[in-house]
Every structure is written in C-alpha cells, then in structure tokens.
Amino acid sequence: MDRVWCAPAFYEAVASSVRPRVPNADSFIGLAFERLVKAELEAHGVRVVSGTYNIGSQEGECDAVIETADRIIFVEMKKKPLTRKSRSGNDINLFYDLSESLLAAMCQIGRHEILLFKHGSIELQDGSETYTVERNGRAVERVALSPVEFGGMQDRGVISQVLKTMTTSKLSAVDASNAHSINKVQKKGQELLDQYNELAKIQSDTKGVTFMNCWFLSLGHFLTILQGVSSNDSFQSSLFTTRHVMMGSLDFYFEHAQGLALKASRKTQ
C-alpha cells in the first residue's frame, strides 16, 4: 500500500495529540486550513475574496468567494472530521457529523445567497479592505470544504440524497441519549429547506429545492481540481468536470480523471 493512504489517519493522529496540549487547537487548525486554501487558489491565478458583512440586522462571514462570468462560488470550510463511530456504521453519529460539516456549510452559504438575491450585492470587509460582490444575474455554487476525506459520502449523488433526507424527512431518536444530536440535525435541515423556499419567493425562476449546485469536497479533492487551473474561469471549468456526470463509483479522483479524459477526447475530435 502506498504510504499516502496513511495521510488522513496521520492528520487525525497529530491533531488528536495536539488538542489536549494546545488551547483552542482546532481554531488554529481552522485558520491554517483557510490560509492554505487561499494560498493555493492565488498560486493558481484564482482571485479569491473573503470577509465579514453587515446588512441591516444580518451579520455573516464568507470564507472564500470566487467569481466567474456566470457564477459566484461560495466556499465554506468546515474542519469537522468523520468520527470513528460514524466510520463504524453508527447512523446517528454519521448524520450528526454530516450536519456539522456539509449541512452547516450549506446553511451558511444559503444565508449569503438570500442576502445577495435580496440586495443585489454583499459588501465584504477584510481588515482595511472592502470588496463588493455584485450578483448581476449570476447563479450561485455552494462548496463545503473539509480538510479530511469523508469517503463515498462526498459523492455528488450521495450528497443530493443526504440533503433531501435531511430537509424532507422527520428524524427521531429511538435512544433518548441521541435526541439532542438528532434535534440539531433536524433544525439545520429545516433551516436549509426554509432558505430554498425563501429563494423561490425572491426569484420566480428558481426551480424549487434542488441540490445541483451543492458540493462537498475534501482538501485532496480541491487540490486535484486546481491542477492545470490558471484563472477563475478555468477553476470553474475544472470544478464542473463532473457536475453533470454520475458514474456511481463513489471515487471522486477516478471520476474527475475520467471527466478530464472525456473533455480531452472531445477537443481532439
């Protein structure tokens, strides 16, 4: 086995040993994660902006915004890993971990999107710099980014089904000790559903509840997408390599490679 397969376990082993010894270790890890992502984007010629906003009574923070000719791509970074209980098949823990990463990021981006649709723009404040993100009729892509892999749970088909389940199903805990976790998942699912309903009222052309624009990527996936990227538009093109294709392999790397090969074959025809 190639030693790179040990990378996710190595990361979690180091992080677990650091947490008891360093106060707010996860906050430092989160900041380092954000800096790495932004540095990699900029190194590939992708202009990325971030910052806080205050619109009326609404306050928020955008981790990263990438603008292209027809898209505004919001990237929210969540460092919640898939715990051992989730990996062992505990469905309650699995839904909770996904709620704290995928669902939390989707809800956060949903707040940005609603304000963008309502006001036409969001003004971001990053230190002494101010940047205005104008909607200008562009669509929004939602990207949840984690530092570690969630395996097949990050497949686009699986993501869509998970989000549908969390927003349309009534969840309950047989074991009372799990009630708190289930309630948190249910609340986030309801928030996401309410956001889509609100967007449908704001924009008459919104096609109801659809998760076509939702992505759940690991850092490894993200770095793979960046290969060969040299601009904002080429980043979107690389991201969209598998947007309309589902192969059922649950292997992002394989499907991305197949998508690139298909693109290359079309160019030579």
Image: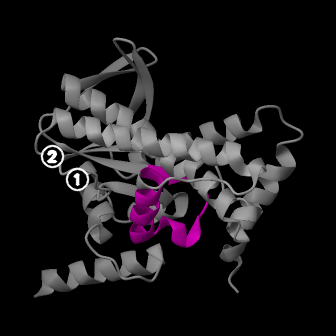
Q: Which residue is mark 2?
A: 69
Judged left or right of residue 245, residue 174 is: right
- Magenta run includes residue 152: yes
Residue occupying the point 21% across, 26% down: 118
One can see residue 154 in this view: yes
Image location of residue 34, percent across then percent down: 54, 41
Between 72 and 165, which is closer to the camera in this rendering?
165
Between 155 and 34, which is closer to the camera in this rendering?
155
Secondary structure state at the residue bearing disc 2: loop
Image location of residue 49, percent across then percent down: 36, 33
Which quarter of the image is occupied by the N terminus?
Answer: bottom right
In space, the residues marked 1 and 2 are separated at their CA atoms by 7 Å
Q: Main secondary structure of the magenta part?
A: helix
Going from N to C along the chain, the mark reached first, 1 or 2, is 2
Residue occupying the point 31% across, 71% down: 242
The residue range painted magenta reads 144-167
Image location of residue 45, percent across then percent down: 33, 48
Q: Amino acid at mark 1?
A: Asp
Residue occupying the point 69% across, 64% down: 86
- Tell me the quarter of the picture where residue 259 sits: bottom left
Instruction: Tell me whether the residue at label 1 lies in contact with that at label 2, contact meaning CB atoms closer than 8 angstroms.
Output: yes
Residue 126, above or below 34: above
Image location of residue 239, percent across then percent down: 32, 61
- Tell me the quarter of the picture where residue 25 sits: top right
Which quarter of the image is occupied by the C terminus?
Answer: bottom left
Q: Which residue is mark 1?
A: 233
Q: Amino acid at mark 2?
A: Ala
One can see residue 47 in this view: no
Residue occupying the point 39% across, 70% down: 157
Q: Within 10 Å of the Cα at label 2, are there few (<14), some (14-19), or many (20+) other Cα atoms?
A: few
Q: Within 10 Å of the Cα at label 1, are there few (<14), some (14-19), or many (20+) other Cα atoms?
A: some
Secondary structure state at the residue bearing disc 1: helix
